[in-house]
Amino acid sequence: MEQTIRVGGHARGLAATGRTDRWWVGTLLTLLGLTGFVAYATWAAFQPGHFFHDPYISPFSSPLLFVRPGAAGAAPLQHAWFGAWPSWWPSWLPASPSLLILIFPLSFRLTCYYFRKAYYRAYAASPPGCAVGALPRSEYRGETGLLIFQNLHRYALYFILVFMVVHYYDTFWAFFRDGVFGVGVGSIVLTIDAALLTLYVFGCHSWRHLLGGKLDCFSCDASSRLRHGAWRKASILNASHGLFGWLSLFWVAFSDYYVRMVSMGRIHDFSTWG
Amino acid sequence: MPERRFRVWRGDARGGGFQEYAVEVDPGMVVLDVIHRIQARQANDLAVRWNCKAGKCGSCSMEINGRPRLGCMTRMNMFGADEVITVQPLKTFPVVKDLVTDVAWNYERNKRIPPFKPRPRGADGQHRMMQNDVDRVQEFRKCIECFLCQDVCHVLRDHDRKDAFVGPRFMIRLASLEMHPLDAADRIPAVRAEFGSGLCNITRCCTEVCPEHIGITDNGIIPLKERVVDRYYDPIQWLARRIFGRGGEH
Ligand code: SF4
Ligand code: SF4
Ligand code: FES
Ligand code: FES
């Protein structure tokens, strides 16, 4: 790469740097991790079936709005919130429940302050690393231009809070097959998924702000004292927000994969139901 | 005593280049010590700014092997035995001479920040605040104004948007004033417009280089961005303000 040397001796241009450590490792891992997830999620979203194996439902397909009864590995009709698959659905699109709902968790993660950092660095080279040349642009505008929608992250949060409740509901029912309590590997997989999602969501910057961060005085009245306590707890999770972001991202894809494989009969789900 | 090789940028605003020095290094030395030894023994006119040698004055900021660091807090034993160590002035600010840059822009910007404006005193004639309320603000008060964060921030460093963005150091100064329980001024419109909070894309390099380990992005800039959202981008809060007046803000 051509680097022009100027006053101060600093290299200029995309990815130009004087750094001698392996600064690109983190960026590369982020690139691979995010690309891997997007590839899997896209593939999974276009699969019409195998998102269900009694009593497990893949988190990619929940809340389950409609089902096409009879599709291989689909949930029974009574599981769907609104019943049978709508007739207006274009025939060239697979009748996949994930296509209807994935937009919500996706927009939550897309506008997450942590993941913004991750993909601005890994995909937009803005910058690719610290003290490493950013992609040159005629006029850098940050999050003021096209990216202004990032300011609506809290609305994605509101939706995800509802999703979280649904995930706990699914997790609860993942311990009952035909009304009989039991534990399967799948029940544990889904429990971990709900737990990781919770740790991720409750460390969200917008959540932390709305809970109490927006106040200037924490001790002024009873409600602000209460909110201060909540803010402090959110701050603890917030300090590891990136970590929980990755763990929950990986685990939700793994949960989908697990349910899919069990539903396809490729993996045997060990359980107390026998 | 082992000899170490240093490449130090020498020159001024008109230009210059790297000069190599072989220096004896004693155990326990930091990069600033080595620079001083070069200055004492080989290059009496080598310019470097320093003051405390204790990581507290923020004067000795430089770029060591490409990373913005304090010269006095960078120990020699973190480098490999044969590693050539490259030392440069900060990239983001104009070079005066050798390792010394002119950081006046920062002080100029700082003057534009509306100062602390105390609320009226309580009924007993006192100003009172609780420790809980100032913990956040105290984190930002640890800043030593080394401007390493300003140097690394790509908005200033690569895109040279000094016209539109005040930089992380002053975002946290704004945050420390905005979050202060006894402050009555409203800087949110300026945070967004004049100081350019939207230019920061929260890629966190400022936080990574801060020698005081201040949570610049997580505790300062992002909370400010959220306050800007409250005021300018959140349609529900906008509506609430229209209906209930300022009370809709909480
Ligand atoms: S997080 Fe924002 S202020 Fe800090 S270095 Fe990145 S762009 Fe600059
Ligand atoms: S915030 Fe940290 S890096 Fe920035 S000037 Fe202050 S001490 Fe230096
Ligand atoms: S900031 Fe990451 S989820 Fe809100
Ligand atoms: S000389 Fe004071 S911080 Fe390095």
Image (spheres, rainbow, N blue to C red):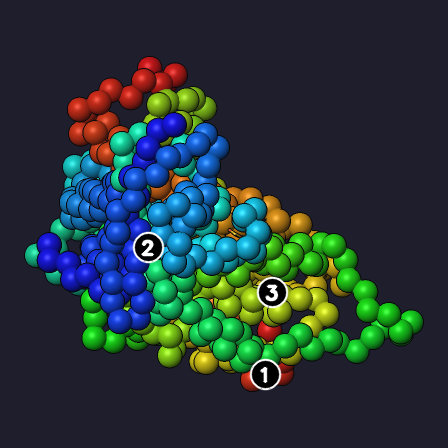
Residue at the (37%, 22%) spot, across then down:
A184
**Which comes sooner in the sequence, label 2 or label 3?**
2
Mark 2 to mark 3: distance in Å?
A: 32 Å
Residue at the (16%, 62%) spot, across then down:
A4
What's the mark number on residue B243? 1
From the top left corner, tell me how far across and down residue B164 is, in percent. Answer: 38, 77
Name the image quarter holding the C terminus of chain B.
Answer: bottom right
Q: Is residue B89 left or right of residue A136?
A: right
**Position above or below: A83 against B80:** below
Q: Residue furthest toward the right?
A: B124
Q: Residues within 10 Å of mark 1 (few under 14, many from 20)?
A: few
- Dot 2 corresponds to which residue? B88
> Do marks 1 and 3 share a subunit?
yes
Amino acid found under the numbered disc labelled 3: Ser
Q: Secondary structure at mark 1?
A: helix
**Chain under numbered label 3:** B
**Which comes sooner in the sequence, label 1 or label 3?**
3
From the top left corner, tell me how far across and down residue A107 is, in percent. Answer: 32, 58
Pick the front one: A171 or A226: A226
**Residue A81 visible within the image:** no
Q: Secondary structure at mark 2?
A: strand
- Dot 3 corresponds to which residue? B176
Amino acid found under the numbered disc labelled 2: Gln
**Chain under numbered label 2:** B
